[in-house]
Amino acid sequence: LLAISAGAVFMGANTYIGNAPNFMVKSISESSGIEMPSFFGYLFKWSLPILFPLFIIVTFLFF
């Protein structure tokens, strides 16, 4: 139960912190005429290579 609770807190905070600035930057960039990646383009180009290892490191660091 401790691991599930801590995982929900740490990983939920990590994903929440990154969400709002992403939407803000995307909307500002698109209104300026700059092409932005799609959801899957962002997922495979930026999110998985950067966030997935970060989540693994945080998991092993605290548990």
Image (cartoon, rainbow, N blue to C red):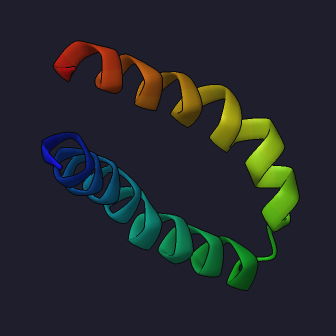
4, above or below 61, in the image: below
Q: Residue furthest front?
A: 1
* Residue at 49% over, 76% down: 24
Residue 12: image x %, image y %? 32, 59
Image side of residue 11 versus residue 3, left or right:
right
Tally of marks: 0
- The answer to whether any part of residue 36 appears in the image is no
Observer-nearest of 36 and 41: 41
Q: Quadrant of residue 49?
A: top right
Image side of residue 59 versus residue 23, left or right:
left
- The answer to whether any part of residue 46 appears in the image is yes
27, above or below 22, in the image: below
Observer-nearest of 3 and 12: 3
11, above or below 39, in the image: above
Q: Quadrant of residue 29?
A: bottom right
* Residue at 54% over, 75% down: 23
Residue 19: image x %, image y %? 45, 67
Image side of residue 35 versus residue 51, left or right:
right
Image side of residue 43 versus residue 41, left or right:
left
* Residue at 86% over, 53% down: 41
* Residue at 18% over, 50% down: 1
Residue 22: image x %, image y %? 52, 65
Q: For the C terminus, which image quadrant?
A: top left
Q: Quadrant of residue 33?
A: bottom right
